[in-house]
Image: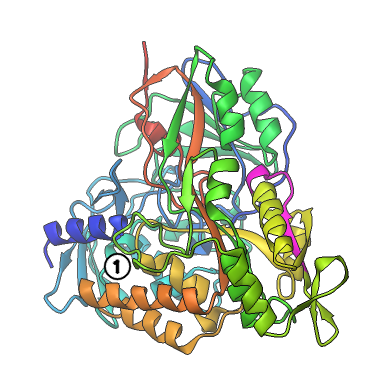
Amino acid sequence: MTSRSIRSAAAAALAGTMAFGVAACSTPTGGKGGGTAGAEDSAVVGIAYEPETLSPLLGYGKDGNSKIFDGLLTHDADMELKPALAAKLPEVSDDGKTWTYTLRDGVTFSDGKPFTADDVVFTYETILDEKTNNASKAELDALEKVEKKDARTVVFHLKYPYAPFAERTVLPIAPRHIAGKQDVNTGSFTTHPVGTGPYILTNWSKGEKLSFKANPHYWGGAPKVKNFTMAIIKDDDVRATRLRSGDLDGAILPPNLAATFKSDQDKKTLSAKTFDYRNVTLPTANKVTGDPAVRRALDVAVDRKAMVDGILDGAGKPAYGPVPTDSPWFAKGTERTHDLKKAERILDDAGWKKGDGGIRAKDGQPASFKLWYLAGDKLRQEHALAFASDAKKAGIEVKVESGPWEAIEPNMKTDAVLAGGGSPADPDFDQYLLLHSSLAGDGFNNMSRYDNPEVDKALVDARRTDDKAARKAGYDTVQRELADDPAYIFLTHIDHLYVVKDRWKDLTTQVEPHDHGLASGPWWNVEDWQPAK
């Protein structure tokens, strides 16, 4: 496989972690390296979530754009892969199992120490170490070993041909001379990282802000935005208020709040297409959501188009699975039409009979369950309420409750959750973690604890080949099985909207994943921003 074919595979795949957040009400300006909203060389942006860790060894920045670190490769505005710490795109053996990377010369970490092949080997070996608490370890299942050929050459040996492996090498590289001398799971590197990236972390006030200063020795050139702050503001209304007051230079907002800035002469709204979906988990341990008939009924009882029109103001599309309908990876014919009468027939035939108040029951078990959503997240709240309303029309009671993740997570085995996910890089990236039975109940992976042998086989077969037709057939099987045997009720795919002060020229967005905090938004390339004047 040549460098050109890698680019083509990445483009085809494109066409084809949940983070924890807490509300912040303090001002993110000032402080060590913080910068001030409106200052000529500073930018302050509002995001909804913050990471649990800043260590790439534990999963931080695994999809790129981490600000502090670089991967061997990175993405351009069109999501094409391009070299970063690698000097060029990798050379791939004919059997697709050996990937050779030549490293860029003259790169140093922000502490002045040189970047070498030892750091690459250390990073990947540490992530794969069973003692490392990295929830995304399964994403590197194809990797058998990584070796240093010389100081400027690294060779990855795969167990099987894995077409999107290059996408896995946007993963940030950690310095062995620092991270290798401490506990990988609890050491200071998890909160005080050192990387090769365009920015240096100066302060992390958990629940409030992350502050960065430009790395003057960055191999890609010193950024013009010298101070960059990400304010952690979980509540959508608070984020909009602080943007309006001038406390922020930009923010991600739900459609209804973004619309309130349309008349502002000094602000512009940017929209990013995404693979970001909202869905409802259906825990198999729950007597109601674990019933296949209830799952099938809910899947046709929901009015997805009404959610797109009413909740998203058209900024999105109906979702029938993890793959958006406009992706070449989408399995045509798996769309589900809103059909309340069909939902009622399914429930009637399965013995769920309507009782007092119109709520169904079977063998003394009411058709009732709890649905959690993240407090302060308007889009999740509105999706949860709309889902509950549609379910009630079919005779199923959904009790909606909000809370922080700390309250939600202990209940995920038996209670439904208004969840989200989605990755544009490759269909394997999201679907394997979402659906494979081996990951049932593994944190936020396979939250429904789905167990479908045909889906398991298709997921494994599709990730173990670089034959695009075979991969497409595998993911088609997954989507058809989800239509027949729903693991989740997928509701919408959401466009991300950002409102930004009109101070910089030529701002762009990428096709974005679900995780749209540090890695996404118009600030995906803040190191390249140029003043408008």
Compared to residue 112, the image places residue 364 above or below, namely: below
Residue 437, position in %: x, y? 53, 83
Quadrant the C terminus occupies: top left
Give the magenta part as a residue range. 369-379
Colour setting? rainbow
The one of 255 and 296 positioned closer to us in this rendering: 296
Query: As drawn, is 176 to the left or to the right of 145?
Result: right
Q: In the image, what residue occupies the spot 44% across and 82% down?
A: 455
Question: How many marks can you see?
Answer: 1
Describe the element under mark 1 as helix, strand or loop: helix
| Nearest the eye: 132 or 167 | 167
Percent coordinates x, y for residue 87 in the rendering: 20, 51
Where, quadrant-wise, is the N terminus in this rendering?
bottom left
Amino acid type at mark 1: Phe
* Residue ID for mark 1: 165
Q: Residue at coordinates 31% horizontally, 56% vertically from top-left?
A: 14
Question: Which residue shows up at 78% across the image and 54% down it?
Answer: 403
Q: Residues within 10 Å of mark 1 (few under 14, many from 20)?
A: many
Q: Tell me residue 460's x, y (percent).
A: 37, 82
x then y, percent, for residue 496: 49, 41
**The stretch drawn in magenta includes residue 370:** yes
Query: Is 351 on the left-hand or right-hand side of 510?
Result: right
Q: 171 left or right of 14?
A: right
Q: Where, by quadrant of the figure, is residue 505 drawn?
A: top left
Q: Indicate left or right for 415 with 225 as reference.
A: right
